[in-house]
């Protein structure tokens, strides 16, 4: 019983279900039908259950057979992954790369890089996450990301390598029908406090969180991405600063109106970052070099 379920038996069961018959399954596995029949019969005897209902013209899986197949496919997938992982370990290709992107960064350049990587035809799983504010540094610190794109603020000392990809400029923008449109000249902090402010929440899980708000407001509306903040301000739900490269197209189209603000919002350098002591595999090296070489439109 301990050896009843073998990889060969699970492959046979999977092939029969996919091909619809013992004969077609045997052909796909380069076996004679009698060998496949024996494999399934042996599995049924060892497990003490019928896996196929043979009372009809076409053999159909019993409930027990369906259960074995469902779990068996998970085992087959894990087996394939194990073999791939060992082969990639020997060849220098990792089994997975985790990349986190701050929401101030457009996903389009990253997707283009992923398409290039797929042309290499390496079986490397890619996890593409999203972080906000200090969440990028937090993702590196907690090892939930190998590379982060779009981190800003004070750089942690000694832990990470960084590559500057641009400088963020900010504009204060409101919806075209917002009451602040009628105010002439610079907007003072006292006037801003009368309206809700839209703030992006920090996604840090372990490190201290940062706050993107720069002025006091009667109400704070927290959202989980820069995209949501942009939409909320276009709808007139609240006010606030936006990265210029994100807001400018909507200002030019009239969906947002730029206003001068007495509260300064300094420019910020923006970086790609990774661990200094990262054990660099071929996939990590490829992405690090390619991501640092492209234009992020900032």
Image: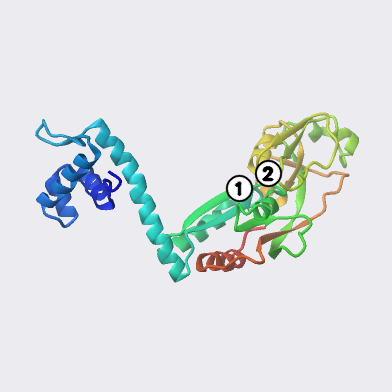
Label 1: element kind: strand
- Number of marks present in the image shown: 2
Residue 90's spot in the image, x, y percent?
Answer: 44, 69
Above-or-below relation of 179 to 89: above
**Farthest-out residue, bottom:** 91
Image quadrant holding the C terminus, namely bottom right
In the rendering, which numbered label is found on residue 130? Answer: 1
Considering depth in this image, is 281 or 151 the residue closer to the camera? 281
Image point (34%, 41%), residue name? 71
Residue 187 rendering spot, x and y as whole percentages: 86, 39
Q: Residue furthest front?
A: 1
Residue at mark 2 = 203
As rendered, which of 9 and 243 lies closer to the eye? 9
Residue 268, quarter of picture: bottom right
Residue 289 visible in image: yes
Q: Which mark is first along the chain, 1 or 2?
A: 1
């Amino acid at each position: 019983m301990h050896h009843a379920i073998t990889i060969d038996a699970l492959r046979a069961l999977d092939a029969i279900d996919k091909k619809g018959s013992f004969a077609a399954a045997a052909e796909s596995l380069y076996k004679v039908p009698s060998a496949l029949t024996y494999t399934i019969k042996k599995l049924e005897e060892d497990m003490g259950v019928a896996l196929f209902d043979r009372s009809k013209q076409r053999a159909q899986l019993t409930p027990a057979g369906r259960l074995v197949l469902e779990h068996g496919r998970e085992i087959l997938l894990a087996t394939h992954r194990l073999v791939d992982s060992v082969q990639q370990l020997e060849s220098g290709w990792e089994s997975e790369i985790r990349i986190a992107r701050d929401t101030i960064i457009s996903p389009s350049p990253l997707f283009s890089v992923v398409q290039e990587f797929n042309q290499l035809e390496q079986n490397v799983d890619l996890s593409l996450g999203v972080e906000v504010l200090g969440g990028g540094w937090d993702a590196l610190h907690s090892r939930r990301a190998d590379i982060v794109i779009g981190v800003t603020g004070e750089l942690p000392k000694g832990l990470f390598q960084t590559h500057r990809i641009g400088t963020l400029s900010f504009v204060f923008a409101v919806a075209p029908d917002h009451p602040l449109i009628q105010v002439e000249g610079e907007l003072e902090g006292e006037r801003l406090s009368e309206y809700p402010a839209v703030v992006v929440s920090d996604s840090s899980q372990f490190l201290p969180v940062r706050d993107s708000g720069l002025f006091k407001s009667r109400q704070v509306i927290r959202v989980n991405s820069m995209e949501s903040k942009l939409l909320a301000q276009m709808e007139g739900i609240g006010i606030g600063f936006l990265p210029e490269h994100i807001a400018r197209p909507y200002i030019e189209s009239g969906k947002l109106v730029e206003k001068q603000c007495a509260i300064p919002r300094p420019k910020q350098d923006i970086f790609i970052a990774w661990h200094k002591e990262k054990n660099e595999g071929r996939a990590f090296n490829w992405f690090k070099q390619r991501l640092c070489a492209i234009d992020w439109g900032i």
